[in-house]
Image: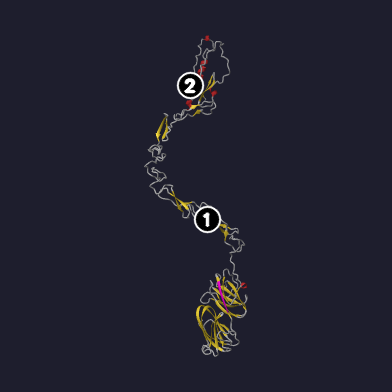
Amino acid sequence: MRISCGVLALVVAWGCAEGNSSGDEDSGVAPLPDLGVVEDLGIVEDKDLGTGDDDAGEPDAGPEPECTIDAECNDGIDCTVDRCDPTDGCVNLADDTFCDDGLVCNGAETCDGATSTVGDGCLAGTPVDCDDGDSCTTDLCEEPTGTCVNAGSDADADGFAAMGCGTGNDCDDSMASVYPGADEDCNGVDDDCDGTIDNGFTCALGSTASCTTACGTTGTLSCNSSCDGFGACRGIEVCNGCDDDGMNGPDDTFPCVQGETSSCTTACGTPGNQVCNGSCTGYGSCVGSEVCGNGCDDDGDGMVDEDCSMPPTNDTCAAAIALTGASGTRTDSFTDATRTIGDCGSTSNDIWYSINLTVPTIVYVDTFGSTFDTRVSIRTGCGSAMLECNDDDCSTPQEQTARLLPAGTHHIAVHSYDSSETGTVSLRWQTMTPVGGDNTRITSSGTQSGTTSGTSGFIGSCAGGGPEDMYFFTTCSGSRTVTATTCSLSSYDTVLVLRSAGAEEDCNDDDCGLQSTVSASITGPGLFGVVVDGYGSASGSYDVSITGL
């Protein structure tokens, strides 16, 4: 593509010599010399510029020329010289010097010059082959001479040949810091080529050992960057609520931590919590505390308002629990009790019991064993007036009372001292059949006076049969000896009986003449009585001394 202007000018100069308007030999102008081949321009034959014998003095007529100037001969290839030859037309000559990169070892570059080549037209040369076939040598071609050099293998130039090449003992010929006798560093490399990595240190950089994590799972110890010991035992994180890998907390590779709770809103619209499941893949259902009165299953157990506070079944007088049998004990919940009647000095809550009597009966109740401060009241009907009220007996916050009640149904209320008190009620009851005469409750020791008259309603095991009176009383817990006597206190033949609810403790006739004395050790708490009777049908006035209460 490069244009050769020098040759074109020479040809034009010869063809335009002054006076050479024809080709005749007698024109006086010497014939044009024969131009030989210009070797470096690729001219391959001589061209006779003289005129022929039959030349009439005018230029020969010929075909239209292929080109008139060199620029018309550009072949688009950088490494060719392009010119316009008057006879041959366009001539494109390959110029290898254009492609020469100045290096010897990579081979001589040439100009292809083919018209099909697009671009610079240069072809790469064939590199000098310096391979001597020996794996223990380093083969190099040196510039600018192109001389092959085959040196012994010491690729890292540390002065030690590669191990395996003759007597070479460099265990890593790619690292200049590695050779026999080098200082060992903490780097996970056998620097001194003695076959041991990081010898002289506690452990080799990156080495590992098996261990057990604080979570009880299998883990791995890794030598630290100073090679002076192993780091923490780290395992693979598993779903167990524990930090197995020692990083970022327990179960950190899972969506949630096993057993962890998260706040949420239940389907009832109330606050709740949800718990991460056993596989740590997500949270379970949102569960809240049961909210009373909303008609919704807040805690997700399939029941509505089941945990709500419910008053005791005997919260009202109309729902009183019946006491059956001559004696017994009940324990009932007082939790969530409400107030039905505010009497017996209480404006607090209460629960109710009832007792049905077919005949007049002495009824005893106590609340010893209850877990809070109680009061007890007795009435006949739910709306009737209170017959009995008692508070704080036997130096306790509990109650004890006894009363002769007529036949019929009677109601017993256990009250709390104040509205904040709750717990359980322990109610104990006893009954005792009264005698035919007077039945009087006494609360302390002393002498009682009376007159027996009427008909007999009770006979003791030792004697009796006359009309009788009875003095009944209650005792606190513990044992005591109770004694009753009519000695020197009565003018008629008496019989005395000491009884407890449902049993006879002692019976005596004629302890001192016609008078009597009874004595027994009794254990409370409970209901007891002293019966003053007459032998046969004997009756009359008496004094009876009762002690030990």
Given residues 77 and 303, the one toward you in this image is 303
| Foreground label between 2 and 1 | 1
Q: For residue 264, which quarter of the picture? A: bottom right
Residue 389 in magenta stretch: no
Mark toward the start of the polypeptide (2 vs 1): 2
Segment colored magenta: 425-431
* Image x and y of residue 98, in percent: 48, 26
Disc 2 residue type (three-letter): Asp
Disc 1 residue type (three-letter): Gln
Colouring convention used in this rendered image of the protein: secondary structure
In the displayed image of the protein, which residue is found farthest to the top?
26
Instruction: Give the CA separation, mark 2 to mark 1.
Output: 91 Å
Kindly identify which residue carries mark 2: 40
Secondary structure of the residue carrying tag 2 is helix
Secondary structure of the residue carrying tag 1 is loop
Crowding at dot 2, Cα within 10 Å, few <14 / some 14-19 / many 20+, comes out as few
* Image x and y of residue 273, in percent: 56, 58
Q: How many marks?
A: 2
Q: For residue 410, which quarter of the picture? A: bottom right
Given residues 309 and 49, the one toward you in this image is 309
Q: In the rendered view, would you say 292 is above or below 210?
A: below
Tag shown at residue 258: 1
Q: Residue at x 58, y 16 (%)?
A: 62
* Image x and y of residue 379, in percent: 60, 77
Q: In the rendered view, would you say 549 is above or below 150?
A: below
* Magenta-drawn stretch, dominant element (helix, strand or loop): strand
